[in-house]
């Protein structure tokens, strides 16, 4: 169980770094991307296990499926953040 958690954190961290490096921008959305990376890694690993995807397997951890899940979850989080309404400045009232 501990080894699985370590692999989840390492895979999520690597995918977060790659996502931010490709995107080229840091911002206030990075903590949400980190959460999405961890949850996407867990979900991707579970889906990969159910679908028997065994491209790069480390013990019981499906690395390719987990990475794909993390990237998709971060993309979804970024798109949802872009759809959020922009915050208005306090001086922009009527």
Image (cartoon, rainbow, N blue to C red):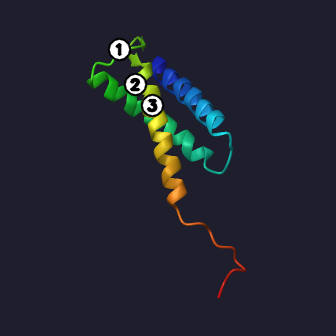
Residue that numbered label 3 is attached to: 41
> Quick check: 57 left or right of 20?
left
User: Dot 3, crowdedness within 10 Å: few (<14), some or many (≥20)?
Assistant: many
Please state the horizontal and vertical placement of residue 24, each as a whole percent of the image: 68, 39
Against 88, residue 77 (above or below) is: above
* Residue displayed at 49% across by 26% down: 8
User: Dot 1, crowdedness within 10 Å: few (<14), some or many (≥20)?
Assistant: some
- Asked if residue 1 can be seen in this view, the reply is no
Please state the horizontal and vertical placement of residue 29, each as a whole percent of the image: 60, 49
From mark 3 to mark 2, how far is it between C-alphas? 8 Å
User: Dot 2, crowdedness within 10 Å: few (<14), some or many (≥20)?
Assistant: many
From mark 3 to mark 1, how far is it between C-alphas? 15 Å
Mark nearer the viewer, 3 or 1: 1
Are the two marked residues, 3 and 1, in contact with CB atoms closer than 8 angstroms? no
Whichever of labels 3 and 2 marks the residue nearer the N terminus, that label is 3
Please state the horizontal and vertical placement of residue 81, each as a whole percent of the image: 53, 54
* Residue displayed at 65% across by 88% down: 94
Whichever of labels 1 and 2 marks the residue nearer the N terminus, that label is 1
Please state the horizontal and vertical placement of residue 3, each as a whole percent of the image: 48, 17
Q: Which mark is residue 54?
A: 1
* Residue displayed at 49% across by 34% down: 71
As helix, strand or loop, the secondary structure at mark 1 comes to loop
Against 88, residue 21 (above or below) is: above
Please identify the quarter of the rendering in which residue 91 is found: bottom right
Count the labels in the image.
Answer: 3
Are the two marked residues, 3 and 2, in contact with CB atoms closer than 8 angstroms? no
As helix, strand or loop, the secondary structure at mark 2 comes to helix
Q: Quadrant of the N terminus?
A: top left
- Asked if residue 21 can be seen in this view, the reply is yes
Residue that numbered label 2 is attached to: 65
37 or 25: nearer the viewer: 25
Are the two marked residues, 1 and 2, in contact with CB atoms closer than 8 angstroms? no
């Amino acid at each position: 169980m501990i080894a699985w958690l370590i692999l989840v954190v390492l895979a999520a961290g690597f995918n977060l770094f790659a996502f931010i490096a490709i995107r080229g921008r840091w911002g206030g959305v990075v903590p949400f991307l980190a959460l999405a990376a961890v949850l996407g890694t867990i979900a991707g690993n579970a889906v990969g296990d159910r679908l028997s995807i065994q491209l790069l397997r480390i013990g019981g951890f499906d690395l390719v499926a987990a990475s794909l899940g993390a990237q998709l979850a971060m993309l979804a989080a970024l798109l949802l953040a872009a759809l959020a309404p922009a915050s208005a400045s306090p001086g922009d009232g009527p």
